[in-house]
Image (cartoon, helix red, strand yellow):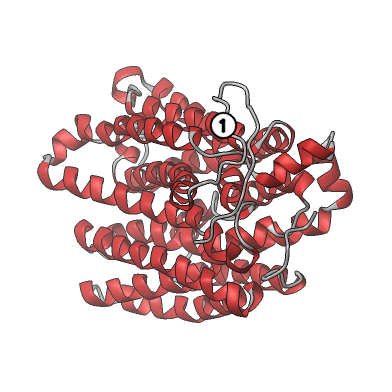
Amino acid sequence: MTDTNAGTVTLTGSPPAEAGRRPSPKRLAAASMVGTALEWFEFTLYNTMAALIFNQIFFPQFDPIAGTILAFSTYAVGYLSRPLGGFLFGRLGDRVGRREVLMWTLVLMGGCTFAIGLLPTYATIGVWGSLLLVLLRFVQGVALGGEWAGAVLLTAEQASVRHRGFQSSWAQVGAMLGIVTGMATLAFFTTWVSDASFVEWGWRVPFLASVLVVAFGVWLRKGVPESKEFEKLEKEGGKAEAPITEIFTRHLRDLLVASGSRIGSDVLFGFLVVFSLTYLTQTLGVPRPTALGGVMLGVLANGFGCLAFSALSDRIGRRIVYIGGALLSAGWISVVFVLFDSRDPVLITVALVVALVLHSAMYGPQASFVAEQFTARVRYSGSSLAYTLAGAVGGGIAPLVFATLHREYAGTLPLKIYVWATLAVTIVSVFAAKETNNRPLKT
């Protein structure tokens, strides 16, 4: 990676940094990754629990499929509340600074994850346990609404023009790191803890352990200087007074392009990493370790793919890589179901690995692509809103839609049509954008 000079500002609650300090590329990458790693660590824990046991311990009065749908609905709350966080923290990110907001979102997000681990279940306090779970997911979603954009801008605004795609993708790699860590943690507990003990107390331990990630993340981010782009705005008095208003009055097209670019990849990811576990284990009777192992290998491949395709987008363009990934994913989704239905562990793994590598052709360049749509004065707000609005109508409801379609209709065609339709939105959105690689960020 390429070092770039960055000045610093003194932020409330943060120690002053040395003037002219150059940010360490490794520390920048780690600080960018840690928040998304925590987000997707919790994502993995929650969605695996939703697919496997939360229908029993928080919604036991319903049949298994209905309980699973309710558990996924609670998951959706965490996505539907994100636009509120996008409005709140996006504005703060453009007004008080990128790093400051990232400290707040990390602590709030981690606190909610820790609290889920302490939550009484339905057996202890009845429906109040379910309601508290919904409340925590809501607050957590608000925090997540401001996390992703800040993590991306931490690297994108300090990256060289020629390598911005690659350097911005570390936030995306953090997501894969969080998923793999979450799955490895679950694999450990499901292997060494009895099913009864796992349902009784074992599921809580990974949520509680998240406090360690939060502490490490706070330490990392305290040692990273403020974005040079924000410092320049502050020095020149160019900060937006009302960045949210400015987004909707002057940058609405940019917001629609950035939001639309994410919908297809979010829905595809929701299918591959969340709903596939339910489909494989409950519908096809595939052993849980086989399903989890296939997803884990696919996610690992996705992480490497994010770096590779992001670097490729720096060379040949964001749009061609992004649209290519969407088209190939649309073609592969039919193959995925054929390989799933074979119930063969090797074929299931191949289906997931190839699908998630193709997904990374969209997901890797996505970070730089979204950030590049907006000017510096509204970049945090615009990126946050694009991320959260697309998440609410894409990834947030995807597992719920998949579960409902699977329950109401025979066969897998409705599931494939849903994926195809959302990938079409992504293709159209990316095609409508101007090419942004090897060009300075908008000022």
Question: Does 441 sit left or right of 187 as displayed?
Answer: right
Identify which amino acid the numbered label 1 is placed on: Ala
Q: Which of the pair 103/358 is nearer the observer?
A: 103
Up-down: is 218 above or below 440? above
Residue at image coords 77%, 36%: 234
Q: Position of residue 291 (x, y in %)?
A: 27, 62
User: Mark 1: which secondary structure?
Assistant: loop
In the rendered image, residue 1, in percent from the top left (x then y), is placed at 49, 61
Give the image quarter of residue 87: top right
Check the image and report above or below for 374 versus 108.
below
Q: Quadrant of residue 125?
A: top left
Would residue 85 be visible to someone looking at this image? Answer: yes
In the image, 201: left or right of 174? left
User: Image quadrant of residue 295?
Assistant: bottom left
Q: Nearer the viewer, residue 314 or 51?
A: 314
Residue on which disc 1 sits:
17
Q: Is residue 54 left or right of residue 10?
A: left
Tell me which residue sits at (66%, 58%) in the image.
370
Q: Answer few, some or many: residues within 10 Å of disc 1's Cα (few below 14, many 20 plus, some between 14 and 19).
A: some
Q: Is residue 30 left or right of residue 157?
A: left
Q: Residue furthest top?
A: 125
Q: Residue at x 61, y 54 (%)?
A: 156
Q: How many marks?
A: 1
Q: Is residue 410 visible?
A: no
The image quadrant where one finds the C terminus is bottom right
Locate residue 339, reporting x and y percent.
32, 78
